[in-house]
Image (cartoon, grey):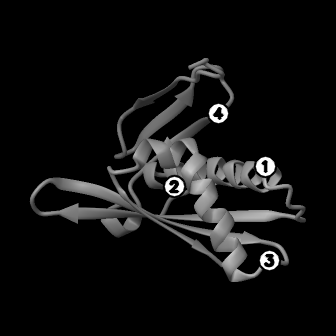
Amino acid sequence: MTKLYTTTVTNTGGRGGGRSEAFDGSFAVAIAPPKEISGKATTATNPEQLFAAGYSACFNSALNAALRDAGVSYKTSSVTATVHLLKDEKTGYAIAVELTVAIDDFSQADNQKYADLAHQICPYSKAVRGNIDVTVKGA
């Protein structure tokens, strides 16, 4: 494999009032737990939101590649990632993801077809396959 890009982000303080900063200075963000799990109302983000942002962006790029490879023209596409933080009494915490794909002017069946193709080539999907539950659905 050829390495295309590397990034480094450092977190201090964990999810309980911490901070994450990119090594190159491109972003810095406050991290706090959501109010649903003992957090306070805040403008800070949490790891699940960051994962959802990264996964949805990467998946949308994979979707665009699948459409391009199939020679299909389209206007715009969107991918919504819903990340669930789960409590498992046996092993602790886990996450699950729902990806909803919408391609303008496409039927639900076509959205599903290209979402399934994107799921096979998306680096995030490959990384989590067999490790977390991911549901992919066309809108």
Instruction: Tell me the quarter of the picture where residue 92 sits.
Output: bottom left
Q: Which residue is mark 3?
A: 106
Q: Label 1: how many residues lie within 10 Å, few (<14), some (14-19) or many (20+)? A: few
Dot 1 and dot 3 residues touching (CB under 8 Å): no
Q: Which amino acid, mark 3?
A: Phe
Q: Which amino acid, mark 2?
A: Gln
Q: Is residue 139 left or right of residue 8?
A: right
Mark 1 vs mark 3, CA separation in Å: 17 Å
Q: Which sits earlier in the primary sequence, circle 3 or circle 4?
A: 4
Q: Label 2: how many residues lie within 10 Å, few (<14), some (14-19) or many (20+)? A: some
* Secondary element at tag 3: loop
Residue 109 in percent (x, y) is at 67, 79
> In the figure, 132 relative to 127: above or below?
below
Residue 41 in percent (x, y) is at 47, 64
* Secondary element at tag 2: helix
Q: Who is closer to the viewer here, 2 or 85?
A: 2
Instruction: Tell me the quarter of the picture where residue 37 sits.
Output: bottom left
Q: Which sits earlier in the primary sequence, circle 4 or circle 2?
A: 4
Q: Which residue is mark 2?
A: 49
Q: Which residue is mark 4?
A: 27
Q: Is residue 110 left or right of residue 10?
A: right
Mark 1 vs mark 4, CA separation in Å: 33 Å
* Image mark count: 4
Q: Is residue 65 left or right of residue 133?
A: right
Mark 1 vs mark 2, CA separation in Å: 30 Å
Q: Which sits earlier in the primary sequence, circle 1 or circle 2?
A: 2
Q: Which sits earlier in the primary sequence, circle 1 or circle 4?
A: 4
Q: Which amino acid, mark 4?
A: Phe
Residue 69 disc label = 1
